[in-house]
Image (cartoon, coloured by chain):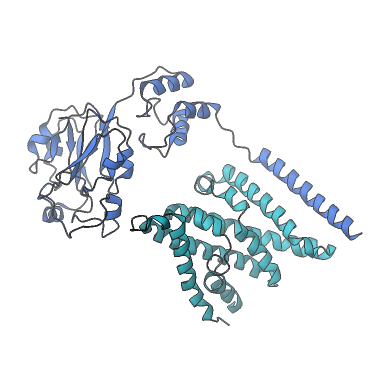
Chain colours: A blue, B cyan
Amino acid sequence: MNILYAVLCFAGLGVLFGVLLSVASRVFEVKTDPRVDQIKECLPGANCGGCGFSGCGDLAERIVKGEAKTNACPVGGVEAAEKIAEIMGVEAEAPVRMRAQVMCSGVNGLAVKKYIYEGEADCNAAVKLGCGDRMCPNGCVGLGSCVKHCRFGAISVIDGVAVVDYEKCTGCGVCASFCPKKIIKLVPFEAEYHVGCSSLDKGAVTRTYCDAGCIGCKLCEKACESGAITVSDNVAKIDYTKCTDCGKCAEKCPKKIIKKGKK
Amino acid sequence: MAEILVIMLAAILTENFIFIKFMGICPFLGVSDKIDKSLGMGFAVIFVMTLSSAVTWVVYHFMLVPLGLEYLQTIAFILVIASLVQFIEMFLKKNVPALYSSLGIFLPLITTNCAVLGAALLNISNGYSFIESVVFGFSAAVGFTLAVLIFAGIREKLKYADVPESFKGTPIALITAGLIAMVFSGFSGISFT
């Protein structure tokens, strides 16, 4: 008798949960657009984050929702952009070729160090020790984590700051994801100028530890005729959708950190 | 009230699931290489363990006991926990997508997490009431999260340490875990009663 109870009881429990789950799968069904999966297949699947979203899956969803352009993937290039445009039923736009740019000019001698680092030659290791050996909390550590992870040999460290070789850079953004200071940014390949500083400190503070730091004086902002450059969080930023490469900001910059970068 | 506090402190420190009871070691070693990953897993465990403690208590006292089937509790609990996790996953996907995207990948892992089953079984063998069971499940999971978090913090730095070739990877992780377990055994001298 006892075994009958046990069998019945567990069979009942099993059936109950089975029914509950099958009902739940209907009730809680989330409709996904089939185009999301199709687009995901066209993307490289590296989840590098070069597009600015949290991965290929996220980008695919954003494209379907219309929040991202069909050419948003910098790695997939023209081929992926065409396929995605076809799925979405829109005209293919050529993707904007991007390149990586290190937003720091604090080479050895200009940027002050706070201690002598003798550990492993890796930026991510160095920042575990008081945020790196530079006084500047947002300056290049110069130990080349980006160099190690670049699959195209496009980055080298010169005088303590990473420098990108534009001809070799494919704009994949892998270097940016390994930079502990997050000072490698992707900019349009054709853009001539960039702000070579990421310091978020006030000008007076920045001045104490770096001779090549943005002091937030806003001279560039005033000089710019197209409103492309703005100073926020004590550092100048260029909006590349508005920038006309006129170079007036670079002329005015007292610290000469707005640089003509493509060479 | 005092009793509840005792259960909480005991479950988090003196009876820590990972370091004292050695339950849930698999996810402990699996997801402890990054702090944010371990936090995600920790929250998922807290969520599931609290709910499963409540549900298994009800199943035990209102179904198994009246039918005299207490000896089948392990099987019943596995069934309940597995279905519960599936259900939670579907519910979250539909109603709380933000939580789903942060816990999503960890939820299926917990289905087979022995710590969750362990909490359910301990609730019964300790003779806890319903409230005590839920509190125990919750605090045991908090203890789990604490352990994974401490370990992830150490492992993030361990990556850059000069470890002998033969100890690299899992061996040094296990040695570290052993050392922390010894530290936690220091709590066992404390009595909260």
Q: Quadrant of residue A152?
A: top left
Q: Is residue A164 visible?
A: yes
Q: Quadrant of residue B71?
A: bottom right
Q: Answer with left or right where residue A186 lies relative to residue B50.
A: left
Q: Relative to residue A78, is residue B143 depicted above or below? A: below
> Residue A219: x and y, percent?
11, 41
Q: Quadrant of the C terminus of chain B?
A: bottom right
Q: Relative to residue B46, is residue A191 depicted above or below? A: above
Q: Answer with left or right where residue A229 lies relative to residue B74.
A: left
Q: Residue at x 74, y 57 (%)?
A: B75
Q: Residue at x 44, y 33 (%)?
A: A45
Q: Residue at x 31, y 35 (%)?
A: A151
Q: Is residue B43 visible?
A: no
Q: Relative to residue B13, is residue B166 depicted above or below? A: above
Compare residues A205 and B34 and report the one nearer the observer: B34
Compare residues A164 and B175 and report the one nearer the observer: B175
Q: Answer with left or right where residue A212 lies relative to residue A177.
A: left
- Count of labels shown? 0
Q: Quadrant of the N terminus of chain B?
A: bottom right
